[in-house]
Amino acid sequence: MAGVSIWRTYYAANEWAEIQSGAKTSLYIQLFGVLFILNEKVLGFESSTLAALKLNIPPVDVHKYVPYSTCCRFGLGVLVYMFVAVLQIIVRKGLYERFVEDKLQQYVDLCSVSNVSVFILVTKRFGYYIHGRSTHGKADVNMKEMHEFLRKEEEDLCGHRGLLPDTDQQTFQILLPSGVHDQFLRLLVPLTSYTQAADRMQGVGGRLAKVDIDRVANTHYMLNKFLSGFIDHSFKDLDYIVKDRVMLEFLLDIECYEVADRGYFYNDDGRSFSSVLFYGNESILLIFDVLLFSIIDIAFSDYVLSMILTFILAKAIQGIRRSAGRRNLVRKALVDERFLT
């Protein structure tokens, strides 16, 4: 928002870049767990997929004479892969996020402490909003003041963090008036070569010419001012209301209201914005990994090779997502990539 220290903006951007490719399951634990169960030299469940089980052949020579059953290998591979993944998700949701750390909630808390709010647009009019305005009106404070602010919040001696007075609701699904996106594009007009400017931010040394710095800084300020005004109901022809979804909207995941010059901020469970992260698309990623693992195993009949190749490709996809996310931050949030770690 307007007046926000750029260091806090960069810090919030860095944390967002970090959680974009984070998932509920660890690829390293998945690799170890699957190979531990299937590999013949450990638990050895792979031997149960032979086309014949009772043979008078030494175990060392059995593979020379008895082929594997493709159906059995596929079924066992999918079962073990899913078992390890689901076990990870249960442990993470039930124990780790409850007693160790919940990175999504930590990010929401960071936004509030940093006095930084975040708009995440999936389409021109639909997206998510994290309300990060500090209840104390400022965030550029020393350590003593910060601890005093947190103490006041713990003892309920100050306002609440929510968008509405006396509420703690900080995250919303948003349906915006078309005018918001139109104004956003108009504010970017001074950056007529914005794509090239964003590319130069990511170029050698990440340096921009002074004229580009001035344009980007001014546009960044104007965008923050406009979005702050929108949140504060400063525009008569661009406004919004906060409401809960009706049952039909909740069940079908749709919006039943026509948006003209008034938008809607729907209260959510605090985690709906995860749908734009790997975290919120775990089921899709898991199905992809299982199918990839199974296809490779059908081709080579080797669980170790299948798991290693699946691991490598999954890490590559994470890297691509991380790189694309950083580029998107540079383009949309006007953040200089030199400050993205």
Image (cartoon, rainbow, N blue to C red):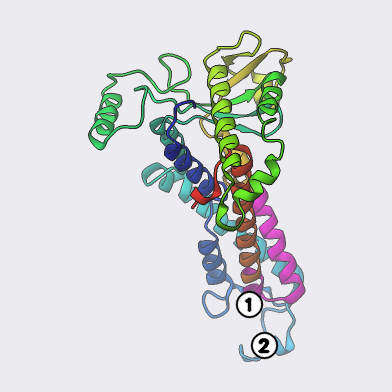
Q: Residue at x 63, y 50 (%)?
A: 200
Instruction: Decide: is 223 above or below 246.
Output: below
**Closer-to-camera residue (208/170):** 208
Dividing the picture into quadrants, the one containing residue 141 is top left
Q: Residue at x 62, y 67 (%)?
A: 312
Instruction: Decide: is 248 above or below 311.
Output: above
In the rendered image, the residue lying farthest to the front is: 210
Q: Give the secondary structure at mark 1.
A: helix
Disc 1 and disc 2 in contact, CB within 8 angstroms:
yes
Structural distance between the alpha carbons of marks 1 and 2: 9 Å
Residue 289 among magenta residues: yes
**Closer-to-camera residue (88/83):** 88
Q: Position of residue 237 (x, y in %)?
A: 66, 10
Q: Which residue is mark 2?
A: 62
**Closer-to-camera residue (55/237):** 237
Q: Position of residue 199 (x, y in %)?
A: 66, 49
Q: Earlier in the sequence, mark 1 or mark 2?
A: 1
Instruction: Decide: is 82 above or below 12.
Output: below
Residue 78 among magenta residues: no
Segment colored magenta? 284-307
Q: Which residue is mark 1?
A: 47
- Amino acid at circle 1: Ser
